[in-house]
Amino acid sequence: MVQPINWPDVKVYVAGHNGLVGSAIVRALESAGVGEVVGWRSSELDLTDRDATMDAITEARPDVVIDAAAKVGGIMANSTYPVEFLKDNVLIQTNVMDAAHAIDIDRLLFLGSSCIYPRHATQPIRESSLMTGPLEPTNQAYAMAKISGIFYIEAHRTEYGRHWISAMPTNLYGPKDNFDLETSHVLPAFIRRFHEAKTSGAATVTVWGTGAPRREFLHVDDLAQACLMLLQTYDSPETINVGWGDDLPIRELAETVASVVGYAGDIEWDTSKPDGMPRKLLDTSRINALGWQPTIKLRDGLTSTYEWFVENVA
Ligand code: GDP
């Protein structure tokens, strides 16, 4: 058993604190009364720069590190820029973990993604499926980087006895998501496409693929609660899944987002665009057994995320 963390007594470094995931973790830490949060925007600290990262983290001397920093993107960005998705993510996670090791951090949480699992993994996907088959080609550069991060965590546990852990969230959404149509994931892309069509009065919105793949969506505030709970209780070399527990076809997601946004026109499917993984539903029995359950239903989370988009992006 690890020593429980008394949040008011600790200084937490959240790598990626201004992003979709990191900002949700900061909100959760603040609600838990955390002593101090440190973080730098990418314009202040480039985490691929090893010397700068080592200097900043060793000088800040946090007690706990949460690595929510990554170069992320949807299916097109991922498959178009495999060099950057592999290289930047390996550099970011290695630099953050090496700096944490240099200052003897004992509690570190590394976040990955459900795309680490094989394309044909048995559904729902258990943690034990890792490395049992080939990856989905459209996101394998990102997946390879995240898999090496999981092993780097395990290596620090084995070689140095660190209580470091990793968790693999499903597809996430919420405030501060990336709504850029070229690089975003499907859910924010649908919010933007349907909002713009409603505003301009367009009769048709064209989206990608066949609509048949199934995806699971978890609100980032649910993930953030899971992260705090895991840091308090989880101490195993095996990564742990964090998901909603159910999925839906992309076609149904499109209809739901259209209805939340208030777009009543047609939806066309551009089947020249890739579908990606047919299904990636996580088996969450291990984290559920630790007492964590998600609470934000998709329609409610979509409604609040759409409000955030209208106020901050549109
Ligand atoms: P994935 O979960 O790694 O495959 O990444 P995405 O969230 O980018 O895509 C999920 C699914 O949504 C894929 O089948 C895409 O083809 C489909 N999709 C449909 N329309 C869009 C869109 O406008 N943007 C994105 N990113 N995906 C879309």
Image (cartoon, rainbow, N blue to C red):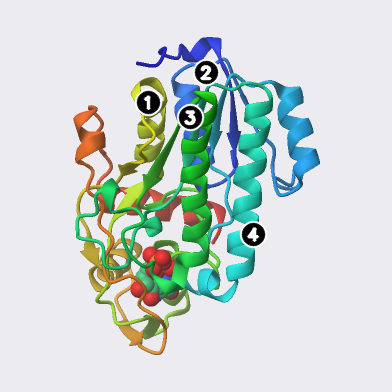
The residue under label 3 is 157
The mark lying in front, picked from 1 and 3, is: 3
Q: Which mark is residue 235?
A: 1
Q: Residues within 10 Å of mark 3 (few under 14, many from 20)?
A: some
Where is residue 57 drawn, in percent x and y?
A: 71, 29
User: In 3D space, how far apart are the residues under numbered discs 2 and 3 (Cα atoms)?
Assistant: 26 Å
Q: Residues within 10 Å of mark 1 (few under 14, many from 20)?
A: some
User: In 3D space, how far apart are the residues under numbered discs 1 and 3 (Cα atoms)?
Assistant: 10 Å
Q: Which of marks 4 and 3 is nearer the N terminus?
A: 4
- Of residues 155 and 68, the one nearer the viewer is 155
Where is residue 26 drawn, in percent x and y?
A: 52, 31
- Of residues 274 and 312, the one nearer the viewer is 274
> Given the image, on which type of amino acid does mark 3 rest?
Arg
Where is residue 113 drawn, in percent x and y?
A: 42, 52
Residue found 36% across the figure and 46% down from its top: 219
Determine if residue 29 is in view: yes
What secondary structure is found at the residue carrying circle 2? loop
User: In 3D space, how far apart are the residues under numbered discs 4 and 2 (Cα atoms)?
Assistant: 33 Å
The mark lying in front, picked from 2 and 3, is: 3
> Does the closest atom of ligand 1 sit within 8 Å of the Cβ of label 2?
no
Q: Earlier in the sequence, mark 2 or mark 3?
A: 2
The residue under label 2 is 34
What secondary structure is found at the residue carrying circle 3? helix
Q: In which quarter of the image is residue 101?
A: top right
User: In 3D space, how far apart are the residues under numbered discs 2 and 1 (Cα atoms)?
Assistant: 21 Å
The residue under label 4 is 87
Q: Does 139 sit left or right of 54 as displayed?
A: left
Q: Earlier in the sequence, mark 1 or mark 3?
A: 3
> Given the image, on which type of amino acid does mark 1 rest?
Asp
Residue found 68% across the figure and 26% down from its top: 102
